[in-house]
Image: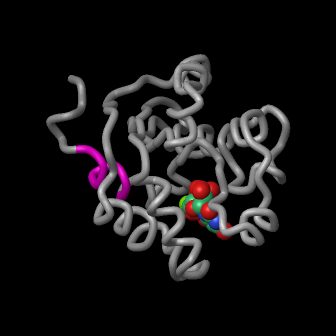
Amino acid sequence: MIQRTLVVLKPDTIQRKVAGEIISRFERLGYTIIAAKMMNASEELLFKHYEWIGALLTRKWQKVFDLTSSMMRGWPVFAMVLEWIEAIDVVRKVVWPTEPKSAAPGTIRWDYATMSYGYADANALWVVNLVHASATVEEAEQEIPLWFNESEFVK
Ligand code: UDP
Ligand code: MG
């Protein structure tokens, strides 16, 4: 199935100047960028993204949610919508899982990071993992209109 998925290059990707390398991995797989922008994510947007859709506050605890939201607001992010065959599962597979320490070699979170839940929690850090990617069809359908207006898509 042809699908659309939301990818957000997080502040750590922009700070390390590896956005191009990461985008090229999605392009290499054949995905088309059909909307993209550098932006400052607002607190409201991040609340909707991480709690209304992602249930992060419900799943974890307040400190994790606050850290994630503030780190995502501390620097610009690069948001994009990718389209092509099985975009949601394939892109997520290249990015997944949340904890870089547990990621499979060859995934983005393995290739660019080392953070573990244990170290993050013990040191009041967020889990630095470079990229957000929609995890499910439902998540993608809710996230894409949250980050992009219809007018921001190329024809
Ligand atoms: N996060 C964190 N600590 C945690 C759980 C999550 O810092 O214990 C951050 C991390 O950056 C993660 C994001 O919050 O990517 C969203 O969490 P989720 O569990 O939805 O992971 P994802 O879908 O990004 O793999
Ligand atoms: Mg998630």
Where does the image place residue 132, in percent across and percent down from the top left? 53, 48
Q: Quadrant of the C terminus?
A: top left
Whole-percent x and y of residue 89?
60, 45
Task: Count every numbered label the image shows and give the total.
Answer: 0
Q: Find ligand 2 in the image and state its quadrant.
A: bottom right
**Which residue is located at x 74 percent, y 37 percent?**
107
Tell whether position 145 is magenta: yes
Q: Is residue 34 left or right of residue 77?
A: left
As for residue 153 lying within the magenta part, the answer is no
User: Looking at the image, is 104 positioned above or below residue 29?
Assistant: below
Secondary structure that dominates the magenta span = helix
Residue under the point 52% across and 62% down: 68
Image height of 131 relative to 30, above or below: below
State the scheme by which the image is colored: one colour
Name the side, left or right, on which 78 lies relative to 68: left
Magenta region, residue range: 142-148
Give x and y (percent) for residue 59. 59, 79
Residue 103 shown left or right of residue 93 in the figure: right
Position of residue 103 relative to residue 111, above or below, is: below
Q: Residue at x 56, y 77 (%)?
A: 63
Q: Residue at x 65, y 47 (%)?
A: 129
Left or right for 22, reference 121: left
Which sits in the foreground, 45 or 138? Answer: 45
Q: Where residue 135 appears, x then y in whole percent?
A: 56, 55
